[in-house]
Image: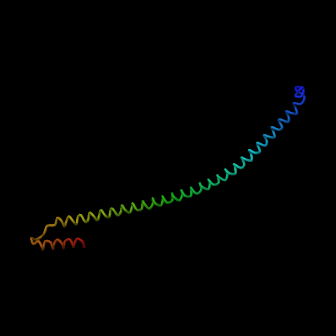
Amino acid sequence: MLLLFLKANWLPILVTILLASGIGYIKHIINQNDRLKAEAIVLNNNLKIEHDNVTVLRRNIDTQNDAITIMQTESKARTEKAIVDLEIARKTANLHTVKASRIVSAVPDNNDKCKAAESLLNSILGEIK
């Protein structure tokens, strides 16, 4: 008897099962779609925040690069000035070395030590002027 019942009513039961399954699947898809839309909103907000962070970082990098360029320019100018100052100091040192050599190698022109010292001092003072 059960066999006859199944043979006679299987189509409406099958349709009902398929319809219920389809409705369940559609509800699942709708829920998943709503969840994905909410997730997309969060991700878009996070993307905007990250984009803003990248913009700030770019600005900071540009500021830092400008500061580095300025420091390099100033450093080059200081180096060039130091080279010029060093050359002036070398020339001055050479001049004073020559003057000192003349003073050290000077031979007193008389035997009187006081007169020889006075003559040496006068020649030194003459060199300074």
Q: Left or right of 64: which side holds 17? A: right
Which residue of the protein is positioned furthest toward the left in this rendering?
111
Nearest to the observer: residue 69 or residue 52: 52
Report the quarter where the C terminus lies: bottom left
Residue 38, position as x, y percentages in the image: 71, 50
Q: What residue is drawn where x is 88% and y is 25%?
A: 3
Residue at point 89% right, 30% down? 9
Q: Nearer the viewer, residue 111 or 18?
A: 18
Q: Is residue 125 left or right of residue 9?
A: left
| Image quarter of residue 56 | bottom right
In x, y percent, where is residue 15?
A: 85, 34
User: Is the residue 113 above or below the residue 10 in the image?
Assistant: below
**Above or below — where is 92 with respect to 8?**
below
Q: Is residue 92 left or right of residue 123?
A: right
Nearest the camera: 98 or 29? 29
In the rendering, at what x and y percent does residue 65 appear? 51, 57
Name the image quarter holding residue 89.
bottom left
Q: Looking at the image, which residue is at 36% across and 63% down?
A: 84
Front-lying residue, 65 or 112: 65
